[in-house]
Image (cartoon, rainbow, N blue to C red):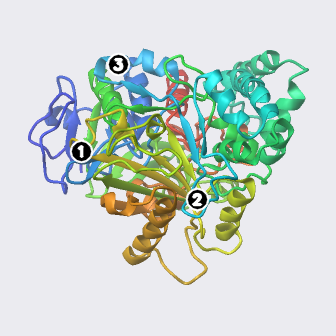
C-alpha cells in the first residue's frame, strides 16, 4: 500500500491541532499536502523524532534531500520532551538538563529563532548534609558549588583547605582533557574492520584522532589516559582528601550508569558529563531549557520543517524493507512499512532507535550477518535509573539551608541537589544493593532539580515541578517483585521519605507524581533496558566499537541503512553529534 498520512491537512510547525492519537498525524511540512506525500518517494526516511533524528533530518534537507521523519508517539522529541503529566504542571519527563548539545548545531539550525532559550544556574550543585538525625555541631551544613571561585573556595574550605586550593586545578585539568577530545565528537570513527571503507575516508577519520592527541600533548597523556580508564574514586583520591567533595563530584561518574565510583571506566563517564557547556560558558555547565527539554526538540522540529522536512507522529514503523540483489547478493534498503500496513519508499533509511531495536526488531530476520548480530546482541543496556517527576505546592525547606520565607527560593534551589551521597562509601553501598543484591537501593542516590525556580512557565503560580533522577534500581529485581504500579508507588515513597529526612514536611508538598523505573523508560521512550545512553558508556562500547566494531561509522551491512541515534558514536546525552555525523555520512555516500 502506498504511503499517505491520514490527516486532513499539513501545517507549519507550532502548536498542532489535536487529532486522533490512533491515526498518523502530520506535524509539519512546507508547501506540501498529503497528496504530495503519496505521489513522491523520499530520499530519506528517519525512524524516530528524537533529537538526533530531527537534527539528521535538518542537515539532510539542507543538503537537498527530501526527508520524512516517522515518530511512533504522539509527540516529537524522543526522551527530550515536555509533557503535562499532572494538570497544570509541565515536566521534562525523561531528559531534564542541557549542556552537551553541540554549538554548531545550535548555530546551523538557528535554534534561537525557534524559541531555544536556556536558564543558566549559579550555583549549580548543592549537597545538603544535615538530616533529622545529624549532630549539627560536628559537620558543616552542606556543600554549595558554582561558577564563582571565591564561593567554591569558601565552601570547600569547610572540609579541607588543601582541597579548596586543588579544586581550581582539578577543573582546569578536566576541562583541558575535554577540550582535547572535542574534535572526536563531530567526526566519523575510523572503520578498521570493514574493507568497504575507502582509504581516503579512513584518512579523514584519522585526522581528528591525531588532532586530539596533538592538543593533549605527551605530558598530559598519562593523566588523561588514567581519567578515561580508571575508577573515578582513584582519580578523585589523587586530587582531594575530603569525602564530601569527592562524593559530590563522583555523582557525574555514575549518573545513568550501573557503576560504582570504584568501577573501572567510571572516570570516563565523569568526563563525558563535563564535555559540554552553555552558550560558550564554562566547561561542564548545565542549564534548564525554557519550556523544558521539549522546547529544545520543538525548536529542532520547527527548524526541520522550515528546511522542508515532513514529520509524522503516531506512525510506528513495523519493519525496514530490504531487497537482495539476485546476482550479487548485496542487501539494499527500499524503505519502511508502518504497523498499519502502509509502505514508504525511500532511497535510504536512518534509525534513531537503539541498535537493539533497529537491528533485532525492525530489521527482517535472517538478513543480517551473524558476526554483526553478535556485536549488536552483546551491547550492554543495563540501567540503574528511576525517574520521578513531582508536582509541588511549594518549595522544599532544607535543614541545611532554611527558606527565608515560605515558597521563596534560595540560591540552592536552582542547583542540582544531591542527597544520599555524602560519602563515597554511601554511593558505593547504594550501587551494591542493585548490582550485587538485585534490589532497589535502601538509600537511593537522589539528584533533585527544580527548574520552575528559574522558569515560571512550567507550573501554576507559587507551585513547582521537580525532577528526581534516582539510582540504583535494577530492571529485573531479585526479590520477586515486578515493577507494578504498587511497586513504583512503594519506591517513590521510599525516595520521598529520604528527602523528608533532609527537608521535613516535603511529603505534604507533593501534589502528584509519576515514577518511571527502567521497564517504564523502555516502554514509553523505547530506551532498551531503560538505558538513557542507548547503551552503556563503557570503554568497550565507545568510538570504533559503538555499536559494532564492524560498523562504527553509522553504516550497516545493508546498503542505505544507517544508525543516527545515541547507540552510535559519541553516545548518549542530548548532544546531537550522532545525528549530525550520520547525516554527513549519508550526504557523502
Q: Residue at x 48, y 64 (%)?
A: 495
> In the depicted view, which residue is nearer to us: 572 or 392?
392
Extreme-front residue of the structure: 137
Q: How many marks?
A: 3
Q: Secondary structure at mark 1?
A: loop
Q: Identify the residue under disc 3.
A: 112
Asked if 130 appears above or below 270 in the picture, the reply is below
Q: Would you call the spot at circle 2 few (<14 residues within 10 Å), some (14-19), or many (20 or more)? A: many
Q: Secondary structure at mark 2?
A: loop
Q: CA distance from mark 2 to mark 3?
A: 33 Å
The residue carrying mark 2 is: 383
Note whether residue 346 is visible: no
Examine the rendered structure and indicate whether residue 468 appears above or below residue 309. below
Identify the mark at residue 21; answer none if there is no mark.
none
Q: Position of residue 458 (x, y in %)?
A: 28, 40
Q: Residues within 10 Å of mark 3 (few under 14, many from 20)?
A: some
Residue wearing tag 1: 3
Residue 381 can be seen in this image: yes
Which quarter of the rendered picture does the C terminus lie within?
A: top right
Amino acid at each position: 500500500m502506498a504511503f499517505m498520512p491520514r490527516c486532513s491537512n499539513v501545517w507549519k510547525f507550532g502548536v498542532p491541532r489535536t487529532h486522533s492519537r490512533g491515526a498518523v498525524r502530520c506535524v509539519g511540512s512546507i508547501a506540501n499536502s498529503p497528496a504530495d506525500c503519496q505521489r513522491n518517494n523520499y530520499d530519506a526516511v528517519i525512524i524516530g523524532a528524537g533529537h538526533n533524528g530531527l537534527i539528521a533530518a535538518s542537515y539532510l534537507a539542507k543538503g537537498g534531500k527530501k526527508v520524512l521523519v516517522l515518530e511512533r508517539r504522539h509527540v516529537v522529541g524522543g526522551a527530550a520532551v515536555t509533557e503535562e503529566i499532572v494538570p497544570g504542571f509541565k515536566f521534562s519527563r525523561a531528559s531534564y538538563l542541557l549542556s552537551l548539545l553541540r554549538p554548531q548545531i545550535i548555530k546551523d539550525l538557528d535554534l534561537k529563532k525557534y524559541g531555544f532559550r536556556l536558564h543558566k544556574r549559579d550555583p549549580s550543585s548543592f549537597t545538603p548534609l544535615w538530616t533529622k538525625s545529624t549532630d549539627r555541631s560536628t559537620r558543616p551544613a552542606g556543600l554549595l558549588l558554582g561558577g564563582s571561585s571565591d564561593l567554591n573556595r569558601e565552601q570547600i574550605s569547610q572540609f579541607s583547605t588543601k582541597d579548596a586550593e586543588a579544586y581550581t586545578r582539578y577543573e582546569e585539568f578536566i576541562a583541558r582533557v575535554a577540550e582535547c577530545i572535542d574534535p572526536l565528537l563531530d567526526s566519523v570513527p575510523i572503520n578498521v574492520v570493514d574493507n568497504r571503507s575507502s582509504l581516503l575516508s579512513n584518512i579523514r577519520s584519522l585526522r581528528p584522532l591525531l588532532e586530539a592527541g596533538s592538543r593533549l600533548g605527551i605530558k598530559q597523556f598519562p593523566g588523561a589516559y588514567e581519567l578515561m580508564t580508571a575508577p573515578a574514586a582513584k582519580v578523585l583520591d589523587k586530587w582531594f582528601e575530603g569525602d564530601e567533595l569527592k562524593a559530590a563530584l563522583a555523582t557525574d561518574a555514575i549518573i545513568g550508569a550501573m557503576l560504582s565510583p570504584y568501577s573501572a571506566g567510571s572516570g570516563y563517564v565523569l568526563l563525558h558529563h563535563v564535555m559540554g557547556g552553555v552558550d560558550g560558558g564554562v566547561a561542564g555547565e548545565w542549564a534548564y531549557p525554557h519550556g523544558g527539554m521539549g522546547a529544545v526538540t520543538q525548536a529542532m522540529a520547527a527548524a526541520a520543517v522550515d528546511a522542508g522536512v515532513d514529520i509524522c507522529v503516531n506512525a510506528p514503523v513495523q519493519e525496514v524493507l530490504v531487497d537482495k540483489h539476485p546476482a550479487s547478493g548485496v542487501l539494499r534498503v527500499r524503505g519502511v512499512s508502518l504497523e498499519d500496513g502502509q509502505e514508504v519508499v525511500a532511497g535510504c533509511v536512518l534509525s534513531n532507535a537503539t541498535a537493539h531495536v533497529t537491528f533485532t526488531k525492525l530489521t527482517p530476520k535472517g538478513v543480517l550477518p551473524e558476526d554483526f548480530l553478535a556485536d549488536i546482541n552483546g551491547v550492554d543496556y543495563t540501567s540503574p535509573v528511576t525517574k520521578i517527576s513531582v508536582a509541588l505546592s511549594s518549595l522544599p525547606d532544607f535543614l541545611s539551608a532554611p527558606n527565608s520565607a515560605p515558597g521563596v527560593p534560595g540560591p540552592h534551589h536552582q542547583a542540582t541537589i544531591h542527597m544520599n551521597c555524602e560519602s563515597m562509601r554511601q554511593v558505593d553501598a547504594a550501587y551494591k544493593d542493585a548490582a550485587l543484591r538485585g534490589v532497589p537501593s535502601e538509600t537511593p542516590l537522589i539528584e533533585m532539580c527544580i527548574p520552575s525556580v528559574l522558569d515560571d512557565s512550567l507550573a501554576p503560580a507559587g507551585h513547582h515541578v521537580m525532577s528526581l533522577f534516582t539510582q540504583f534500581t535494577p530492571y529485573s529485581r531479585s526479590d520477586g517483585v515486578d515493577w507494578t504500579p504498587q511497586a513504583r508507588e512503594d519506591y517513590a515513597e521510599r525516595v520521598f521519605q529520604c528527602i523528608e529526612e533532609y527537608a521535613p514536611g516535603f511529603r505534604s508538598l507533593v501534589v502528584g507524581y509519576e515514577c518511571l523505573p527502567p521497564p517504564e523508560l523502555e516502554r514509553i521512550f523505547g530506551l532498551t533496558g531503560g538505558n538513557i545512553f542507548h547503551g552503556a558508556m563503557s570503554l568497550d562500547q565507545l568510538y570504533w566499537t559503538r555499536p559494532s566494531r564492524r560498523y562504527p561509522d553509522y553504516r550497516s551491512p545493508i546498503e542505505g541503512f544507517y544508525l543516527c541515534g545515541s547507540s552510535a558514536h559519541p553516545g548518549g546525552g542530548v548532544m546531537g553529534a550522532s545525528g549530525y555525523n550520520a547525516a554527513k555520512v549519508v550526504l557523502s555516500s
